[in-house]
Structures are given as structure tokens and as C-alpha cells.
Amino acid sequence: MLNLVLFGPPGAGKGTQAEFLIKSYGLEHLSTGDLLRSEIAAGTKLGLEAKSFMEKGELVPDEVVIGMIKTKLENNKAVKGFIFDGFPRTVDQAKALDNLLNENGTPISGMLSLEVDKQELINRLMKRGEISGRPDDQDQSVIENRINVYNQKTLPLIEYYKPQGKHFGINGMGSIEDIAGRLEAVITKL
């Protein structure tokens, strides 16, 4: 089973590249952002709780996210693998995910880390906000807070996966096709 963590700051292109990987490798996309947004759209208790954190650019609590992921894994046992997009975001989440996957004998194959300049991230997110109407992508101070939260709380995941030989830095600048080609070159080696 091919289990990939698609990693990078907000606006790095994880969602776009996940679509390519799903088509190319027949993987199941597990986007915590999509899971959370669907809960918000449905107006569930979990969705409303998550919304209050997301609107401030903060992370949704681990227990909420991990519970949703466990359910998704249990409901998709016959897939070729998963692309984890937006999760894990902290070392504790990575450990919890490893425990969950190791119970099933299906560990993480690799962490593909999209690396993008900060100003490019801000530009991409502001543009996405214009198109999508997402409020968290329309306010530059919220965007900058999300990037700062990523740098403080999520970036250390690289040091978690590096000693395991599972971290792969990918240049996330350039065309969608160029970035997809760089991802494919790494996955072929896995």
C-alpha cells in the first residue's frame, strides 16, 4: 500500500497536486480541510467547533481530526493507498497516524514536502480567496497567521520524518505540470 503525506504550507498546491496523484496512482484522497469544510457546510456541532478555530487561522484540535481520519480509513479498506493532505500537522498527530497505520500494517511510505516562497503563498491564497469565496483566504493577516502557525507547529514534522528516511523536499514553484513531474520522480523511487 502506498501511503503518502502531502506536506507544505497553506497555498503550496497540495490540493492541486493531490488530484494528479489520485488519478496517476489510484489513491484515496484524505484531506482534513475537505472533511472539516463538509462538516461546516452541514452545520454539524463538529463543523461549528472547527469553524471557530479555522476563522482565526488556528489548528483544529487533534482529537477531532484524528477521529475523522480513523473513520475514513475504516470505510476505505480496499484502496491502493492514501494521500494525507493537511494531516498530520504536528509531531503528536504524526505519531498518532503512525500508530493507526501500523495497527493495519500499512505505514507511511513517504512525506512529499512542497517548498514555496512566502510571498508566492500569500499571492496564491489571495487569488484562491477571490475565486472560491473562502473567508480564510481573503484576509492577508489571517493568511500570514496561518503561515506562521505552519512554521511554528507544522514545519517540525520534517524532523520527525527525516530520520525515518521518509522526508522528500519538492520544489513547489513553477507550473502545475512541472511540480507534478517532480512528485512523480520521487514516488517512482518509493
Image: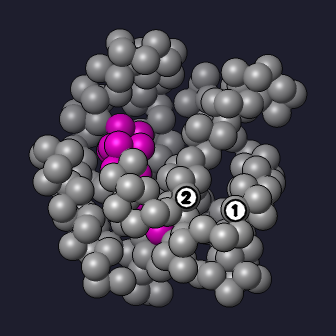
Say which residue label 1 marks: 76
Name which quarter of the figure residue 102 lies in.
bottom right
Mark 1 or mark 2: whose residue is earlier in sequence: 2
Residue type at mark 1 is Asn
Residue type at mark 2 is Glu
Name which quarter of the figure residue 117 lies in.
top left
Q: Mark 1 and mark 2: span between their CA atoms?
A: 8 Å
Q: Is residue 53 visible?
A: no
Nearer the observer, 188 or 10? 188
Q: Position of residue 75 (x, y in %)?
A: 76, 59
Q: Is residue 96 visible?
A: yes
For label 2, the SS is strand
* Residue 9 painted magenta: yes
Taking the image as shown, residue 3 lies to the left or right of residue 62, namely left
Badge 2: residue crowd in 10 Å (few <14, some 14–19, many ≥20): many
CB-based contact (under 8 Å), mark 1 and mark 2: yes
Q: Residue furthest right?
A: 45
- What residue is at 59 percent from the left and 38 percent from the top? 34
Q: Is residue 111 above or below residue 62?
A: below
Q: Position of residue 49 (x, y in %)?
A: 79, 29
Q: Is residue 13 above or below residue 2?
A: above
Nearer the observer, 55 or 97? 97
Question: Magenta residues?
Answer: 4-18
- What residue is at 82 percent from the left and 33 percent from the top? 46
Q: Is residue 114 above or below residue 95?
A: above
Q: Position of residue 155 (x, y in %)?
A: 44, 58
Q: Position of residue 36 (x, y in %)?
A: 67, 36
Say which residue label 2 marks: 28
